[in-house]
Amino acid sequence: MPTRPSQVDPRRLESWARHRKAVGQRIRTLRVEQGLTQEALALESGVTRNVLIQVEHGRRGLLYERLFDIAEVLRVDAAELLTPER
């Protein structure tokens, strides 16, 4: 039996999917603006390139710690990764 609302509430699942996609797009935008390849960002932040690809496409979320590691490599505050592009 599911124990978390996100496991049964379709609206919650959709909301998390939108958040994952927004964070992934923000990471990709900053990475490209800084001229970093996926490989370079992955190596410097400690995630695998496959994970980074999935994150940038919104198919996977990040551990809290990895979010900060990626933000550090991109030289931004972690909160900026959670802020949608304007």
Image (spheres, helix red, strand yellow):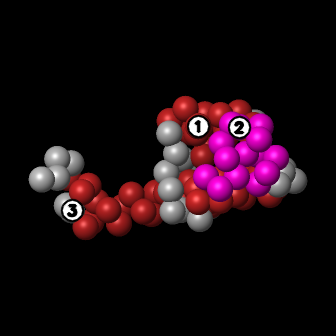
Give the x, y percent position of residue 53.
65, 59
Identify the residue at horizontal 49%, vertical 51% (top origin): 61
Identified by mark 3, the residue type is Asp
Q: Quadrant of the C terminus?
A: bottom right
Identified by mark 2, the residue type is Ser
Q: Which residue is mark 2?
A: 45
Give the x, y percent position of residue 67.
58, 39
Query: On residue 9, which mark appears?
Result: 3
Residue 24 visible in the current orientation: no
Q: Earlier in the sequence, mark 1 or mark 2?
A: 2
Is 19 or 7 nearer to us in this picture? 7
Identified by mark 1, the residue type is Arg
Q: Quadrant of residue 10?
A: bottom left
Query: On residue 50, which mark appears?
Result: none
Identify the residue at horizontal 67%, vertical 47% (top origin): 48
Residue 83 located left or right of residue 69: left
Q: Which residues are magenta?
A: 38-51
Q: Is residue 78 magenta?
A: no
Identify the residue at horizontal 36%, vertical 61% (top origin): 15
Residue 53 located left or right of residue 73: left
Secondary structure, mark 2, is helix
Secondary structure, mark 3, is loop
Q: Is residue 49 magenta?
A: yes
Q: Which residue is mark 1?
A: 66
Determine whether label 1 and label 3 are within 8 Å by CB: no
Q: Quadrant of residue 57?
A: bottom right
Identify the residue at horizontal 55%, vertical 32% (top origin): 65
